Amino acid sequence: GLLGEYRGEFGGRGAELAVVTDDDDGSEESNTNDSEEEGGRSVITNKLLWALGWAWHRIMIIPTNQGILGVNLGKNKASDDEIGDYTTGIRKLGPYADYLVINVSSPNTPGLRSLQQREPLYNLLTSTMKARDEYASHAPVYVKIAPDLSLSEMEDVAAVVMETGIDGMIVSNTTNARPESLVSPNKREVGGLSGAPIKNRSTECIRTMYKLTNGTIPIIGVGGVGSGRDAFEKLKAGASLVQVYSMMVYEGPGVVSRIRKELADLLVENGYKSVEDVVGADCEDIYWNRVEERVKKRMEAEKIVIV
């Protein structure tokens, strides 16, 4: 469904739509054929296409010029054709998206996270980028990764991201881990954990991926963002943009305005003129090289010459 619809009146700038692609129990096998002819009528046989139809309807009823729309794509639970699933999603929904997310990190789809391994990820990203070029050339593509990756796994992801030239990363998804700090009696339930418990791990993953890619790949930081300071920490770690989801449940769309105001106050307090000036500040070597590059570009644009 719509995971974060926050409009201009709340100070937000976007929404992200995720597509559920199969039966809850996974009992029906996936069929990658679009349809079959029966009695002169085209009968939809693939649950993926039902979900895509629902998503298309949601897109059609959203007013135009009301922010940025992202489409978050995953594979079908029972499918053995992952690339086909993602490609179908891009073909059906890509024309309406402002950006596309190749989600390889949902903890609720068996086998999905194996796509984060080097060779499967390379094959998936090269294929989906070709599909993007064909069906939605206007839309940047981001890969969404898990917070549970080891350092060597993150190194593999960084290498593939750099090699394929994908437009960016979303760091990170929910976690399978269960911190000892959890007090709920439901803490042992299976599924992805989001919100405050994953904030620090998500921020550390952002910092690591920023370093591994030398700050050259834009990162959308997500995971436990509930205040302006949380957003500030994500930016300093290397995120260029910040996304909110769990706090939307607890506080509603108005949380976006509060976070923006708190972040603006923190920028002023710390002597920053813009969000761009904060990005990657925790990684000093990369940060100051990027500052120097921005200054040079600004001077070139203004034709300033230092003698």
Image (cartoon, rainbow, N blue to C red):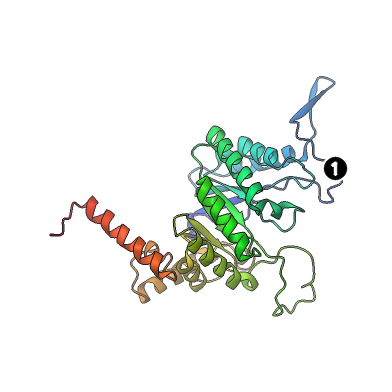
**Above or below, 80 relative to 284:** above
* Residue drawn at the location 58% of the way across and 36% of the way down: 131
For mark 1, give the secondary structure.
loop
* Residue drawn at the location 49% of the way across and 71% of the way down: 233
* Residue drawn at the location 56% of the way across and 50% of the way down: 160
Q: Which corner quadrant holds the C terminus?
A: bottom left
Estimate the x, y position of residue 273 in percent, counting from the top left: 33, 67
Q: Which residue is mark 1?
A: 28
Q: Nearer the viewer, residue 9 or 88?
A: 88
Q: Nearer the viewer, residue 36 or 146?
A: 146
Residue type at mark 1 is: Glu
Estimate the x, y position of residue 57 in percent, counting from the top left: 65, 40
At label 1, counting other C-alpha atoms closer than 10 Å, the crowd grade (few under 14, some 14-19, many 20 or more) is some
Side (left or right) of 172 relative to 207:
right
Estimate the x, y position of residue 126 in percent, counting from the top left: 58, 41
| Residue lying farthest to the right in this orientation | 27
